[in-house]
Image (cartoon, rainbow, N blue to C red):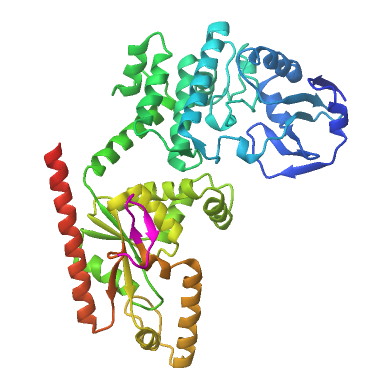
Amino acid sequence: MRNKFIINKDIKEILGKNRQKLDIVSAFSLECGMLGKNIFYKKLNTKKIAERYSGDYIELWKEYYYKVRQYVELANFYGIIQTDYGDIFEISEYMQPNEILENTPIEWEKFYKVYLKILEEINKIIEQYGGQIGIDTSIWNFTIDGKLFDLDPPRIFKGKDSIFSNEKDKGHYNRTFYRNFTEEGMKTNLLATILLGIKKGNIIIKNKSSNYLEQLLNSLIDTFKEKEAIKGKLFGSNTNQLSDFTNHPIKIIRNILKENKEESMKAEKKQKFIFVTGPSESGKSGAVIHMTRSFPNIVKHLKIRNIFREMYERANKEKCYEEWYEQQTTENFEGFWDYYIEVASDLAENADIVVMDTLYGVDEMKFIHSRFGKNVGLLYIDAPLQDRISREYTRLRTDSPYSDRKADLTITWKQIEEQTRIKDEKKRKAGAFDLKRLAIDENGKLIINDNALVHFADVIDNNGTLKEFEDKLDKYIRKELYILRKEREKESEEK
């Protein structure tokens, strides 16, 4: 061992454990992984470090560690060592994914306390060191209890050779100095990364206060002595007073404030979100096509699977889509559907009615209703089994008018009958048929109630001619538009 700084005396025993590489990326590391069951290691990028710092890196890290831990609560670090081959390993206690703020649902009150705690720690560092030492305040570097777990590279400013930035790139140098060493930069970077995380869905805050954004902003501003100056930068229109580099925290905050304002203005125009469901081959797709064509710019169609894909594209995408979807829908059910509502509202634009196909789960419908209330509806398209088989038989034996699909004259009635029964059984298991049984109880919640006088879903029976079916759909949309107009008028009068 060429060099070392050992915090925990058992580190020699730790180093003897089997090394298991993990699929984790870090800016200044070549590899991250496990030593045994509970120890996490980073194999640092010594070449990158040497390009930006000519001194003894371990001594620098040691000095930084002792100074920062006086004012900032740190995760449990075991030490840092350099092997005889020159490799540098940073070793700490392994934290489970649910201990880290990123991708872990957390209640608003608890999150807000963590936010205030970090702001206070920044104040102490600034007061003590005045910009000579700082921390990377990106929110994903903290645990759900507000412990900082990423210390590389050390944020000690002894000159250009220890700022760990690309000096040839002036914008990169300025950004590193601003975000890691100045009071304004550390605090606004904290807020900017929180807002970005919420927007992308990897910072999941449950039961956010209705004025959470205002609370975050006001708490940040209150920590400054020159409050009016920071207000001017956060809310002013003059960007010339801001350092010129990409991903400037204040520019990020301004953009998100602008987006939120636009969303609030859009929200004033009440919209109705309607999920279309029902058994296989009942006419759901035809219903959606007819409604959007008959009421252009009023009714908009969004496919649920496309909303899921957009949610994934906005996420950090560390996993493939299938893994991401499985994890989110099982481990983060409420956060997933909260984010679904946000993205669906974004994609809805200015449509009065947004129809979405196809929802099957009762739990999903109950949760969405708990968030949307009367602004969400359920349209259940039903049809007799023999009619559904007949329509699918005719459809598949005819060229599609909407795609390049050609008629399949080899298909038989028996095959279609079997396929339809299999699809119905899958939907039955998923809960699709139970959606028809939902009703609103005395507390305004959705429950399954077969004896209810009025059920939540509007049921349209597609048991006649195409013209009769389309007339039913037109009547349904006109009814929803009438209700929507009355609600808007009522809200306008109340204002």
Give the answer, above or below, for where 199 lies relative to 167: below
428 horizontally vs 297: left or right: right
Where does the image place residue 78, in percent across and percent down from the top left? 77, 25
Residue 25 within the magenta-colored segment of the rendering: no
363 horizontally vs 491: left or right: right
| Magenta segment | 439-452
Where does the image place residue 198, in percent across and percent down from the top left? 45, 38
Observer-nearest of 123 and 409: 123
Give the answer, above or below, for where 386 lies relative to 335: below
Residue drawn 20% across the image and 58% down it: 298
Q: Quadrant of the C terminus?
A: top left
**Residue 75 seen from this side:** yes
Observer-nearest of 485 and 139: 485
Q: Quadrant of residue 8?
A: top right
Kindly report the secondary structure that dominates the magenta region of the rendered protein.
loop
Residue drawn 45% across the image and 23% down it: 188
Q: Quadrant of residue 221?
A: top left
Where does the image place residue 296, in percent across and percent down from the top left? 20, 62
All told, the count of numbered labels is 0
107 horizontally vs 35: left or right: left
Give the answer, above or below, for where 378 lies relative to 392: above
Residue 442 within the magenta-colored segment of the rendering: yes
Observer-nearest of 416 and 422: 422
Q: Quadrant of residue 47?
A: top right
